[in-house]
Amino acid sequence: LILTFSSRAEIARFVDTLRNPSSVLRACAAFALLQFTMPAGRHAVHHAALLQKAGASRVLRWAAAAATAPIEAKIFARIVLRNLELHQAGPSS
C-alpha cells in the first residue's frame, strides 16, 4: 500500500512537471518516467498501470510533439509511450 501511494504521488508529480515551462525540468521528468517504465524494471508493469490511470499518455504525446521541448524530452517521452504500449499489450508468446 505504501509503495502504491508513494509511486502514484511520484508519478503524478513527474507527469505534472512535463507541463512545466522549464525545458530542463521537462527533460528530467520525462527521463524519470522512462526509469519507471523500463521493460526489465521490477515494478514497471505496476508503474505503467499508474501512468495509464493518471492519463499520462495525453501529456506524454504533447511533450513528444512540443516545439519548445528539448530533443531529450521528446525522445524520452516517445520511449515512455512505447513502453506503456508494450506493458498494455502484455508479454508476447
Image (spheres, rainbow, N blue to C red):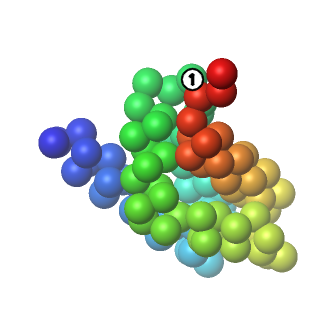
From the viewer's perspective, tell me whether residue 79 is left or right of residue 90. right
Where in the figure is residue 69, as x and y percent of width and height? 76, 68
For the N terminus, give its image quadrant: top left
Is residue 62 among what the camera can see? yes
Q: Residue at x 67, y 53 (%)?
A: 81
Count all numbered tags in the image, as a single digit: 1
For residue 14, say whether it is visible.
Answer: no
Q: Is residue 50 placed above or below 61 in the rendered structure? A: above
Under mark 1, the amino acid is: Ala
Q: In which quarter of the image is the C terminus?
A: top right
- Tell me if 66 is positioned left or right of 57 in this view: right
Q: Position of residue 64 (x, y in %)?
A: 75, 64
Q: Can you give x and y, in whole percent of width and height, for residue 56 in the image?
A: 53, 64
- Quarter where residue 20 is shown: bottom right
Q: Name the residue under label 1.
A: 40
The local crowd at label 1, few if under 14, some if 14 to 19, many if 20 or more residues have their Cα within 10 Å, is: few
Residue drawn at (25%, 45%) of the image:
4
Residue occupying image coordinates x 41% and y 62%: 53
Q: Which of 56 and 90 is in front in this view?
A: 90
Q: Where is residue 22 in the image (x, y as percent from the top left)?
A: 62, 71
